[in-house]
Image: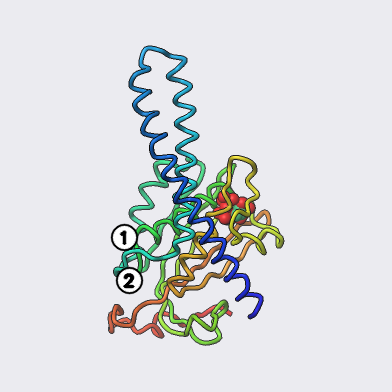
Amino acid sequence: FEARLLRSQRMESIGVLAGGIAHDLNNILAPILMSIDILKQDSRGKEHAHRMLEIVRASAQRGADLVRQVLTFSRGADGEYMAISFRHLFNELENIVRETFPRNIEIEFNAQANLWPVMGDASQLHQVLLNLAVNARDAMPVGGKLMFEANNKAVDADFPGLEAETPAGSYVELVVMDSGTGMTPEVLERMFEAFFTTKGEGKGTGLGLASVYAIVKKYHGFINVTSEVGVGTTFKIYFPVDPSLRSDSRAPMMIDNQRGK
Ligand code: ADP
């Protein structure tokens, strides 16, 4: 327990530091991006200059994306709280992944009927889904299967992964499963660390899962991950459901009678 506490304190201070840097960098990048856009307009007809500006713009944009990720990670979940259904978030994400993911990845979305809403910030919950989706895509360079699921779940005291700060009760279970490369025990151990990546220079930021972790923690949720090299990875994320948001006709015990051990 102490080791875990230490780790989360360290993550928090990294977060504060990173947030400060990201904020400053954001102010630096905004005028760069704006100027490039203006120069691009001016450089029409000058093919070489135009092409160079495309490259500069792509790099600056990558910087801006990284900054956005750092800010999400360091802010955790101070966002706009409202009742949100993963069914709605799935619809949004489905449009994006069907448009942008390679055709050799088979994609499936499944949200159970009468899914309970969770309290949260839509863009942060979307970020969680997107980060997991992008990792799954990257883990399937030759294609495979990507599945999203959302279920109502009654979680009792001996549920795997449940911690002191996440009491038993009603949760929405989010499942993201891929048939990708899987992770070695060493990678599994470190995957939530900020700036930890195996994707190589210029590809990964190592902030995807750190952001997921920070957001889920702020919402008092918890995460279970299973992964096997050559088989795939399953993320199960549990978000607590405010009892007042539950429809009483759907008592959780009726739905969850096959709790995993
Ligand atoms: P990044 O995606 O920038 O590398 P993340 O924090 O999102 O940073 O992920 C950290 C590392 O965890 C990845 O580099 C990868 O090695 C591993 N990882 C995360 N998700 C998966 C997955 N679905 N399958 C295999 N490996 C994964």
x%, y% of residue 132? 50, 56
Residue 23 position (above or below residue 193): above
Q: What residue is drawn where x is 63% and y is 54%? A: 196
Label drawn at residue 117:
2
Please state the quadrant of the image where ligand 1 appears.
bottom right
Residue 240 position (above or below residue 27): below
Numbered-mark total: 2
| Viewport quadrant of the N terminus | bottom right
Residue 179: tell me if it is visible.
no
Relative horizontal placement of residue 55, taking residue 120 as reference (left or right): right
Q: Quadrant of residue 178?
A: bottom right
- Name the kind of residue labelled 1 in the image: His
Q: Quadrant of residue 240?
A: bottom left
Q: What residue is drawn where x is 57% and y is 78%? A: 160
Q: Mark 1: which secondary structure? A: helix
Q: What residue is drawn where x is 65% and y is 49%? A: 198
| Viewport quadrant of the C terminus | bottom right
Query: Mark 2 Cα within 10 Å, few/some/many (few <14, many 20+)?
Result: many
Given residues 121 and 147, the one toward you in this image is 121
Marked residue nearer the N-terminal end (2 or 1)? 1
Q: Which residue is under mark 1?
A: 88
- Name the kind of residue labelled 2 in the image: Pro
Check contact, mark 2 vs mark 1: CB within 8 A: no
x%, y% of residue 79? 35, 63
As drawn, the residue found furthest toward the bottom would be 157
x%, y% of residue 103? 47, 40
Q: How is the image coloured?
A: rainbow
- Give the CA distance from mark 2 to mark 1: 10 Å
Q: Quadrant of residue 109?
A: bottom left
Residue 258 position (above or below residue 89): below
Q: Mark 2: which secondary structure? A: loop
